[in-house]
Amino acid sequence: MTRFATGWAIFQGLLIEALPFLLLGVSIAGLARWLVPQSTWIKRLPRHPLLAPVVGALLGFALPACECGNVPVARRLLASGAPLGTGFGFLFAAPVLNPIVLASTWAAFPDKTWLLWGRPIGAFLIAIALSALLGLLPESRLLASALLEERRLSQPLSRVGLLERRSGLVGVDFNASERRLEEVPLRPAELLQHSTREFLSLLTLLVFGCALAAAVQTWLPRSWLLALGSGPTVSVLALMLLALVVSVCSSVDAFLALGFAAQVTPGALLAFLLLGPVVDLKLAGLFTVLLSTRAIAITAVAASLLVLLIGQWVNLVLL
Amino acid sequence: MSARLDLLLNAVFHPVVAIAGVVLMVLGAIQLRSAPRLKTPLTPLSWLVSVAVALLVLLFPPSPSFSDLAANRSEILPEAPRLSFFLPPEQRTLTEWVRLLRSQPDPDLHAGDPVRISGFVLQRPGMQPQLARLTVRCCLADATPAGLPIEWPANADPKPDEWLSIEGTMTTQTKDGLLINVVKPRTIQSIPRPERPLEP
């Protein structure tokens, strides 16, 4: 019974900690939807397979949010017709490439310059590699179906036919209708309704993720994972598992890592800080509004492999 | 409400959470007022889950067993927020003592120092009960215990999670062939759980 009470407290702590950041992310997405008309600058973003994720990753500086906050923003980007590479670059890199997270990493490890550079560069590389990998899949198999339909509405008819789009105006000059759609700004009341619905559905997923993370934290002894902290490969794997399970926001995970920085290899530490923002138990639930199940599985496996490789290389160099 | 937050999160995050809470309540009020004009209904599942969780969180305050939590965690502490070894011994808190003892490996250095600490009783399976505190950087998820071994007098019966205030002296003892620091209490007092049980 006490175990359950402790688990309930950890769940509440995780949930309440993540809530403000989720709210921030949904607000930023809502602001973006209001201030930016559906198609102007988003469609002018580069589509080049290498340049698109870079641009997406850099967008993280303009829209600071931790990993739970950037899912609604990424969804908004993709729904508005941004190139896939940009959306994924933002989704995977923005949790690290933003001023708040960089500042917290610096606050926790002011003396580890290799980490202060390694974290953003590693996040960049992972984002580019993941978006290149996911770009190999066709859009219809990649994105969640609701997002796919919304996205198709903002793509030109030349690329997506009426049947695929499942809506549209037949017998009307397309250019004229598109211009009319663009000119109607969203009323604040509708925007609020939209954002609230988005927030609530994301909150549901966050609740499930936090519950799972709290359950594993309470019933799985952490000493098991940390006892493996000294082997060069085993430590990386152990800390990757810890990152998946602990699921704290990327804006504070640097402080969590500080707690065991002395006991683990440098590669393992970097692996913890790189994998957490990209995929963890809490995020896996949030991703379902963006990606299909197959894409989530591919992301998880590919990200883990990449982080394992990076961790081992760092250990090779630094140990 | 802030008492519950003190149990869950580092004090630094309280304002952030408070602001988020206020914003959410304002948004909720606006939504309720315009409910009759709602055109599209929210999906029932997300409504149900959110309301259920909100009610549960409000009705069932967190009452974690610190001892249980701490028994499951490793003991590697984050860095201290301020320099502590310039403080006279009787002003050092429990966490400061633990950090000090870990950074200076010679136990005899502190033998004879007066000790005035408070914490909860931490019972790790198979070990003597210690007096401990939890330090957090973010929230309960990363709480790390800092514990001091106590030479409990014969008639003492420390129960796990009991909060005690102990005054005594720091002594040394040989345990398993190693010299370690142990607190020899002069007075042991039961205290209510402090307002801010989680230390930065």
Image (cartoon, rainbow, N blue to C red):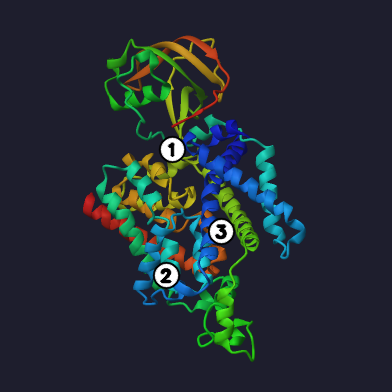
Same subunit under labels 2 and 3?
yes
Q: Which amino acid, mark 2?
A: Thr
Q: Secondary structure at mark 3?
A: helix
Q: Which amino acid, mark 3?
A: Gly
Same subunit under labels 1 and 3?
no
Q: Which residue is mark 3?
A: A285
Q: Chain of mark 3?
A: A
Q: Secondary structure at mark 2?
A: helix
Q: Chain of mark 2?
A: A
Few, some or many residues within 10 Å of mark 3 (<14, 14–19, 20+): some
Using the rendered image of the protein, determine whether residue A298 is visible from the camera's viewpoint: yes
Name, please, the residue furthest toward the bottom: A171
- As measured in the structure, the alpha-carbon distance from the residue carrying label 2 to the one carrying label 1 is 33 Å
* Residue A113 drawn above or below residue B112: below
Residue nearer the viewer, B69 or A65? A65
Which of the image's four quarters has the N terminus of chain A? top right
Please state if A190 lies on the left or on the right of B10 as rendered.
right
Q: Which residue is mark 1?
A: B137
Q: Secondary structure at mark 1?
A: loop
Please state if A267 lies on the left or on the right of A198 as rendered.
left
- As measured in the structure, the alpha-carbon distance from the residue carrying label 2 to the one carrying label 3 is 22 Å
